[in-house]
Amino acid sequence: MTHKLTPITPELYEYLVAHRSERDPVLAALAAETEALGGISLMQIAPEQGAFMTLLARAIGARQIVEVGTFTGYSALCLARALPADGRLLACDVSAEWTAIARRHWQAAGVADRIELRLAPALETLRALPAEPRFDLAFVDADKVSYRAYYEEILPRTRPNGLILFDNVLWFGRVADDAAGDEDTRALRALNDLLASDDRVETVMLPIADGLTIVRRKD
């Protein structure tokens, strides 16, 4: 197979990020506050990924979204921006500390009324929902060993042709490194293999940020 890949240098990355239409001062402020937290800020999605997710949610006319793993709220804000006034985002997280930052910025952006934050283990929240299709889009960016469990709870609650997005599926390249055998890497490899062969869905893995897989539930 011929590889068609443009290596991303720091200069090219800055060019790429600059050429998106999103110009949201609240997102910029949230990104800056999160970056000031130090190394843990790596848990925040990249700006081009956020812009892509906003565009994708708008393109499919999403009205009901679920997010597993909210952190300081950047991805939730990107998704809530795409919702109509009566749309709703269910955000699942366990940290009151990090989501307190999120709440402030959601309020500043004028989308707080579209977001329901549930502070509890996400599997408990998902399993308490009616087992019927309701979500147009889901975004999973939480503990990697639970990705498979999140998938099995979210898929039946996603409408036909609805989308499920999984973050960090390349795991800094470790999924393709035979020497990497930690629990997170093994869990992501297993998920990636499952999604590529699951006849319930159609799947594409994209080299956006640390890898983003888009799953479409079939009719």
Image (spheres, rainbow, N blue to C red):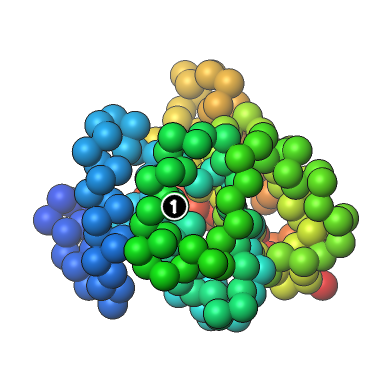
Looking at the picture, how far across and down is residue 14, in whole percent?
A: 17, 59
**In this image, 77 relative to 116: left or right?**
left
Looking at the image, which is closer to me, 24 or 96? 96
**In this image, 152 relative to 19: left or right?**
right
**Label 1's element?**
helix
Looking at the picture, how far across and down is residue 30, in whole percent?
A: 30, 53
Residue at point 72% right, 72% down? 161
Residue at point 46% right, 43% down? 99
Quadrant location of the C terminus in the rendered image: bottom right
Residue lying at the far left of the rendered structure: 11
**In this image, 209 relative to 57: left or right?**
left
When the figure is inspected, residue 162 is found, relative to residue 43, above or below; the finding is below
Looking at the picture, how far across and down is residue 5, in whole percent?
A: 33, 58
Residue 176: tell me if it is visible: no
Residue 14: tell me if it is visible: yes
Label 1: how many Cα within 10 Å (few below 14, some 14–19, many 20+) = some
Residue at point 75% right, 47% down? 126
> Which residue is denoted by mark 1 in the rendering?
103
Looking at the picture, how far across and down is residue 55, in whole percent?
A: 45, 74
Residue at point 81% right, 44% down? 127
Looking at the image, which is closer to me, 98 or 63? 98
Looking at the image, which is closer to me, 93 or 15? 93
Residue 39 lies in what quarter of the image? top left
Residue 172 lies in what quarter of the image? top left
Tell me how many marks there are: 1
Q: Amino acid at mark 1?
A: Arg
Residue lying at the far right of the rendered structure: 131
